Image (cartoon, rainbow, N blue to C red):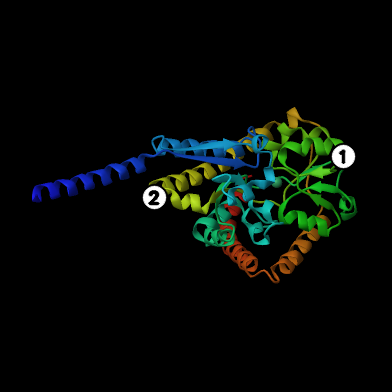
Amino acid sequence: MKFTKMAIVALAVMLTFAVTAQAAEKKVRWKLAMTWGPTAVPFSDAVENMAKMVEEMSGGNFVIRIDASNKHKSPFGVLDMVKLGQYDMGHSASYYWKGKDINLLPFTTMPFGMTAPEQYAWFYHGGGMELMQKAYAKHNVMSFPGGNTGNQMGGWFRKEINSLDDLKGLKMRIPGFAGEVLAKLGLTVTNIPSGELYTSLERGTIDALEWVGPGMDIRMGFHKIAPYYYTGWHEPATELQFLVNTKKFNKLSPANQAILKNAMKLASYGMYTQNYHMSAEAWAKIATDYPNIKIKTFPKSVMDAMKAANAELLKEKAIGNPLLAETLKSQADYQKKAREWTKMSDYLYLEDNL
Ligand code: CA
C-alpha cells in the first residue's frame, strides 16, 4: 500500500517535470512590424540582425517574423498595432508618436541636442531608459533603443536658403520637434513615410525634405530634384526604437527576455556603425559622382532663429506636461555635463587633427 502511494507520488512528480520541460521547449513565434520598407538599409538590417541573433541565441526556439510597411500598409500605425497586440514587436521612431502622446517625443533626438555617444550614455547610464519606460507604460508597451543614425543632414532644398524669407512658406517633410521649430518660422511641415518621399518631392506635394544622411539619401535620388544639401542642426543623434508589447514580453521565459534585450542592444549599436560606414563611403564619392549636389550650411541668421524658436518651444511644451518637462530637464542636464567631456576629448582632438 505504502509502496503504491509512493509510486503514484513519484509518477506525478515525473509528469510535472515532463510537462514543465515541454513548456520550456515550446517554440516562441513573434511578429514584428516595421515602419520602413524591406530595403531601407541599414534600418531594415538592424531588425534582421536582431531577429537573427534571437534565433541563434535561443537555439532556434524564439523566432521573429518581420513584416515591412509594404506588407502591413501602416508605417505610422506601428505603435497602435503593438499596443493592441496585433504585433508582438515593432521597429520605428519615438518622435512619430508626438501627436498621440507628447511625452513620447524626446526619445528619438532633439534639435541642438545630444550627439550619439552622449545620448547612448544618457539612455543606458543617465536615467534615459527609465524615463522612456515611464512614458510608454500607459500604452502597455516597452521601448528600447533600436539603432542610431548619428548626426543627420539638414535636408534637400530646390533653391539656396540665404535668409529666413527663403524658408517662409516652404512645404517641408520634417518630423519631430524640428518640424515644430520650422513651423514656428513659417514653414508648412508634414511627415511622410520613406517610401513616398521621392514622389512627394517630384510632384511638388513638398518643396523640401530631410531624410537621414548621404548613405541613405543619395540612393533615394532627391538630388535630382532638390540639389541644395544642407548640413544638420535638427537630428544630431536619431535613435530608432524597438517597441515590445509588455504582456507578451512578460510571458517570455527569463532566458528569452535576456536574449531579446541583448539582441536589441547589439543590433542598435550595429546599425550606428553601419550607417556611419555607409555615410563615410557615400561622402567620399559625392563630389566626383554627383557634381550637381551643392553642399551648404544655413546662414547664421537662420541658425540663430532656429535656436531661438527651439528654446521658446521647449519652454512652451513643458508647461502642463510634467513627464515631458522631467525628460527635457534630464536631457538638458545630461547634455550640459557630458558636453564638457566631449569638448575635452573628441572636440579638442578633432580641432588639431582635421
Ligand atoms: Ca530625419
Tell me the amino acid under the disc marked 2: Pro
- Give whichever of discs 1 and 2 has the lower sequence position: 1
- Tell me what residue is drawn at x 9 percent, y 49 percent: 1
- Disc 1 crowd rating (10 Å Cα; few below 14, some 14-19, many 20+) is few
115 or 6: which is nearer to us?
A: 6
Q: Residue furthest front?
A: 1
What SS does tag 2 mark? Answer: helix
Rendered location of residue 323, percent (x, y): 62, 67
- Tell me what residue is drawn at x 68 percent, y 51 percent: 96
- Disc 2 crowd rating (10 Å Cα; few below 14, some 14-19, many 20+) is few
Viewer can see residue 152: no
The residue beneath circle 1 is 204
Q: Is residue 172 left or right of residue 240?
A: right
* Vertical arrangement, residue 153 with respect to residue 135, above or below: above
Work out how far the residue at label 1 is from the one at label 2, CA to CA, in angstroms. Answer: 51 Å
The residue beneath circle 2 is 254
124 or 38: which is nearer to us?
A: 38
Q: Is residue 31 left or right of residue 285?
A: left
Rendered location of residue 122, percent (x, y): 55, 58
Rendered location of residue 294, percent (x, y): 80, 38
Q: Quadrant of the C terminus?
A: top right
Q: Is residue 350 left or right of residue 217?
A: left
Tell me the amino acid under the disc marked 1: Gly
Rendered location of residue 203, percent (x, y): 86, 36
Viewer can see residue 79: yes
